């Protein structure tokens, strides 16, 4: 069976505990939720951090604390920070990149969101890409619109990113791309033409989460994405019990398509996370043992 990376986006910036009390918000909750998701089969965690009032934060201290806990409790797991914009000051969005997570999200253009413009002007995109390059962080390019693919190409041509980018198509955000298999095929056609060496995944929001996982598996994606950032329900009238439940659902979808969850070693190989970065994780794991 082919190994597929299961990425879990545990918190995001939009849902609140009042929407689903199982949403992990504090550092300890985020570490515990990631561990359960890791044990259920996830090999990549996508992180947002929150202030005490649950609002979105860019605080490097929070990112650092969550990453340190995950390095201890989930050895080898790929840690990806969000540099996303909802509720965050543009100047602060890259503040945690110096902590050198394995990966970070990078949006390469602006788009309408349900109730705001998600602003990613070219100068901001370039500065985030540069900061990732400086810290040895592998970007995950977030595609909320077709034009964002050409934005990624522009980064490569400017020497701000490598040819073998990892790309995520985000489907089902109101006012952006709808969740449709036809749209995914169109995006993949352009991906193969514009970024032929890219690996890819797709994320479906809300009730579209499972069908987008199926479309991605059917089309040979390296990664499938799940998690409470995108979806807090297992049915219209039922809240999920936590991120691990969503990971278990993704594992079941993998089995249905003749795939299985990748180990952390396989995940790093599939996504080209360099041995150098592996070493860094090992160092952190050792640190964890010493401090108990
Ligand atoms: Zn996110």
Image: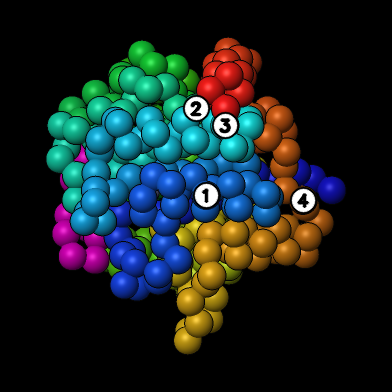
Q: Is residue 135 left or right of residue 269?
A: left
Q: Quadrant of the C terminus?
A: top right
Q: Secondary structure at mark 3?
A: helix
Task: Say which residue label 1 marks.
Answer: 32
| 279 vs 109: above or below | above
Is the distance from the Cβ of mark 2 to the nearest ligand 1 atom less than 8 Å? no
Outermost residue to the front: 292
Across and down, in percent, residue 137 comes to 44, 23
Q: Is residue 121 magenta?
A: yes
Q: Residues within 10 Å of mark 1 (few under 14, many from 20)?
A: some
Q: Residue at x 60, y 52 (%)?
A: 37
Residue at (15% x, 32% y) in the render: 91
Q: Where residue 134 appears, x then y in whole percent?
A: 36, 13
Q: Check disc 3: other Cα within 10 Å, few if <14, some if 14-19, many if 20+.
A: many
Which residue corresponds to the image point at 63% horizontal and 47% vertical from the top-left?
A: 38
Residue drawn at point x = 72 percent, y = 42 percent: 262
Q: Is residue 33 visible?
A: yes
Q: Which residue is mark 3?
A: 72
Q: Which residue is under mark 2?
A: 102
**Distance of mark 4 from mark 3, alpha carbons?**
24 Å
The magenta region covers 110-122
């Amino acid at each position: 069976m082919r190994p597929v990376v299961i990425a879990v986006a545990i918190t995001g910036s939009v849902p609140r505990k009042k929407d689903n009390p199982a949403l992990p918000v504090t550092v300890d909750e985020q570490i515990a939720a990631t561990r359960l998701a890791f044990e259920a089969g996830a090999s990549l965690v996508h992180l947002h951090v929150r202030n005490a009032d649950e609002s979105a934060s860019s605080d490097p201290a929070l990112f650092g604390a969550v990453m340190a806990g995950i390095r201890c409790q989930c050895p080898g797991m790929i840690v990806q920070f969000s540099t996303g914009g909802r509720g965050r000051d543009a100047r602060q969005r890259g503040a945690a990149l110096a902590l050198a997570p394995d990966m970070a999200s990078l949006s390469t253009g602006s788009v309408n969101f349900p109730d705001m413009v998600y602003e990613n002007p070219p100068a901001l995109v370039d500065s985030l890409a540069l900061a990732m390059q400086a810290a040895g962080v592998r970007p995950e390019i977030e595609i909320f619109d077709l034009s964002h693919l050409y934005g990624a190409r522009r980064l490569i041509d400017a020497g701000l990113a490598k040819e073998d980018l990892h790309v995520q198509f985000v489907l089902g955000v109101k006012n952006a791309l709808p969740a449709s298999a036809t749209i995914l095929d169109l995006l993949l056609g352009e991906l193969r033409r514009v970024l032929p060496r890219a690996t890819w995944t797709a994320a479906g929001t809300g009730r579209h989460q499972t069908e987008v996982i199926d479309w991605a598996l059917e089309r040979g994606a390296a990664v499938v994405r799940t998690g409470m950032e995108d979806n807090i329900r297992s049915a219209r009238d039922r809240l999920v019990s936590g991120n691990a439940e969503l990971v278990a659902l993704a594992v079941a979808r993998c089995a249905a398509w003749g795939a299985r969850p990748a180990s952390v070693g396989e995940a790093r190989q599939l996504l080209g996370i360099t041995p150098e970065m592996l070493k860094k994780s090992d160092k952190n794991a050792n640190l964890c043992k010493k401090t108990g």
